[in-house]
Amino acid sequence: MTATELTITGRRSRVRRHGRRRFTFESVTRVVALSAFGLYFALPMIWVVLAPSKTRAQLATLGPYGFGSFENYGRAFQNLMSYHDGVLWTWVWNSVWYSVLSVLIALACCIPAGFALARTPMKWRRLILILTLVIMVTPGSARTIPTYLMLDAVGWLNSPLSVIIPQGFFPFGVYLTYIYFSTSLPPSLLEAARIDGASEWTTFWRIAVPLARPAVGLVTFFAFIESWNDFFGPYIYLFSEKLYSLPVGLASLISNSPGIIPGGTISDLPIFQPEVALAGMIVVVPILVIFLGFQRYLGAGVLDGAVKD
């Protein structure tokens, strides 16, 4: 073997060794970072799952991640059901259909609006997009008084419409669909359809919507999370306990349980920390189900909207 071949071979071996060290370092760093973030978010949820398995005394004596018994889950659930003759199920049902109807309204508004802003020649398009972004970043508390006055003017206060309609108009969904249609929908397809004589509605319904399933998944997921977790709106606009959503109902339950908040309304209900943790699980489970069901669309929507054609 010549000196040149030896030199090339030595360089290749050094490159391979350097590459292996670099790959190993990057892999370890990535695993450590992801593990740290995973533990940061997972540990509180693990505590919430394990807390209903323990009694109040066991919460103080066992470790934070100790397990009590499966019987305690049933006991905690029965205690929750003892509050106002099982009104918890009413709150769950209210949250479900409030959220579902809000998502349907959001899809009916956001998908056409995003397509129109992205791919349809229209006057004042830039101004409309700017206003959409302004509304999107405006805190919800700043819109509470105007929304309250409008709902009062049309007689919708203390009704399901006072929760469904404000949540149905979802400016973030308009922005998501605008970004998706701007970056992932080939303009040549729309032009070909228009040349063939297709109307704007046909172009939208037959071409844009079938290609926008990832965007639909994104809007569905975020609109559902926004509606399901909403506390401030139902708390302000609803006065009847029978109409409460689950977050507002649980806040009412906790405020009426002296075992949780000393000095609260006097009550003999056996609702303490294990019962509240179980109620927290009830709130989280639908979100987890929606996330798992739409995970494929979430990934596709984020990746497809990240690169412009």
Image (cartoon, rainbow, N blue to C red):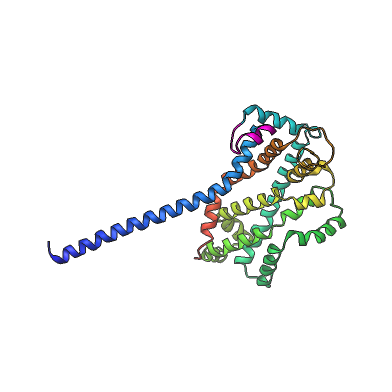
Quadrant of the rendering where the N terminus is positioned? bottom left
Q: Position of residue 47 (x, y in %)?
A: 61, 40
> Which quadrant would residue 108 be assigned to in this image?
bottom right
Within the magenta stretch, is there residue 63?
yes
Residue at x 79% of width, y 47% of height: 160
Q: Nearer the viewer, residue 108 or 188?
A: 108
List x then y, in percent, for residue 130.
67, 69
Name the residue at 14% across, 66% down: 3
- Which residue lies at the image location 27% right of the left edge and 60% below the top edge? 14
Q: Residue 91 placed where, x, y %?
A: 75, 40
Q: Residue furthest left?
A: 1
Asked whether the viewer can see residue 199, the reply is no
List x then y, in percent, for residue 66: 59, 35
- Asked whether 52 or 284 is in front, the reply is 52
Q: Nearer the viewer, residue 138 or 18?
A: 18
Q: In the displayed structure, does residue 40 sit left or right of residue 139? A: left
* Front-lying residue, 269 or 215: 269
The residues colored magenta run: 55-67
Residue at image position (67%, 66%) is 133
